[in-house]
Every structure is written in C-alpha cells, then in structure tokens.
Amino acid sequence: MEAITRGDVVMQSDKQVSCSVDQGIVVMNVDAGEFYDLNHSASDVWRLLDSPTKVSTLCDRLCERYNVDSERCEKDVLNLLNRLREKGVIKAQKMKL
C-alpha cells in the first residue's frame, strides 16, 4: 500500500463507527472488532475527516488551530493518517490531475 501524501484526499471509512468520550474520540473498526482511543489532537484530525479532505488543507487548518510549524504538522499528520488507514478506519484517494 502506497503511503498517504499531502496531495491525497482522506476521509473516514464506512467500516468504522466512532463516538465522543470526554474530550477525545473512540473509533471502532467494525470488521476487525478493534477499538482505538484517539488523544485530543488525533480527535481533532478525526473530526476534520467527517467529509473528504485534502491532506494539505487538513494540515493548514491544524497549523492555524495549534500554531505549529507546518513541516512538523505535516509529518505528524501523515504518520497518524497512515496508521489510521492501516487500521482500516480511514481511506485515501490520490488526486487526479
């Protein structure tokens, strides 16, 4: 599986269910029966994935919200997105030119 890049569009998978718990989110992969407890910043990313979103747009929003360096943000977000996709709770599409 090719790694997610900043030009890809990402979204929540239809094979998951999620709910808010305190200030975080718990996501379940329905097929695998596995739960993932997202921390505060990962929960913010999850909320932004409720509709298809380009990774670069997602990073721009997070940089504004957290006042973080764009390179650091992109690295951390791509790491998170690739892990979430491996767990089957998000999907990614390459942008067509």
Image: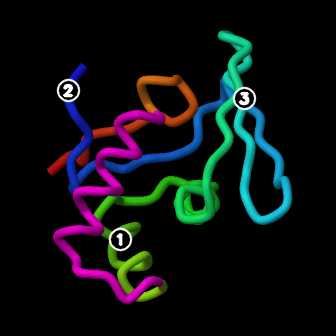
Which residue corresponds to mark 3?
Answer: 28
Q: Quadrant of the N terminus?
A: top left
Taking the spot 40% from the left edge, 44% from the top edge, the residue there is: 81
Work out whether mark 1 precedes mark 3 in sequence or the reverse, and give the earlier one.
3
The secondary structure type at the circle numbered 3 is: strand
The secondary structure type at the circle numbered 2 is: loop
How far apart, in angstroms, are the residues tagged by discs 1 and 3?
25 Å
Taking the spot 38% from the left edge, 38% from the top edge, the residue there is: 92
Q: Quadrant of residue 34?
A: top right
Taking the spot 62% from the left edge, 63% from the top edge, the residue there is: 40
Q: Is residue 15 above or below residue 4?
A: above
Region rendered in magenta: 66-84
Instruction: Please state if 74 lies on the left or on the right of 37 as rendered.
Output: left
Which of the two discs, 3 and 2, sits closer to the camera?
3
Work out whether mark 3 precedes mark 2 in sequence or the reverse, and give the earlier one.
2
Instruction: Please state if 65 lies on the left or on the right of 36 as rendered.
Output: left
Give residue 57's mark: 1
As rendered, which of 70 and 22 lies closer to the eye? 22
Q: Position of residue 67 (x, y in %)?
A: 37, 89
Work out whether mark 2 precedes mark 1 in sequence or the reverse, and give the earlier one.
2
Taking the spot 66% from the left edge, 30% from the top edge, the residue there is: 14
For the residue marked with disc 1, what is the amino acid? Answer: Thr
How far apart, in angstroms, are the residues tagged by discs 3 and 2?
23 Å
Q: Position of residue 72 (x, y in %)?
A: 22, 68
The secondary structure type at the circle numbered 1 is: helix
As rendered, which of 42 and 14 lies closer to the eye? 42
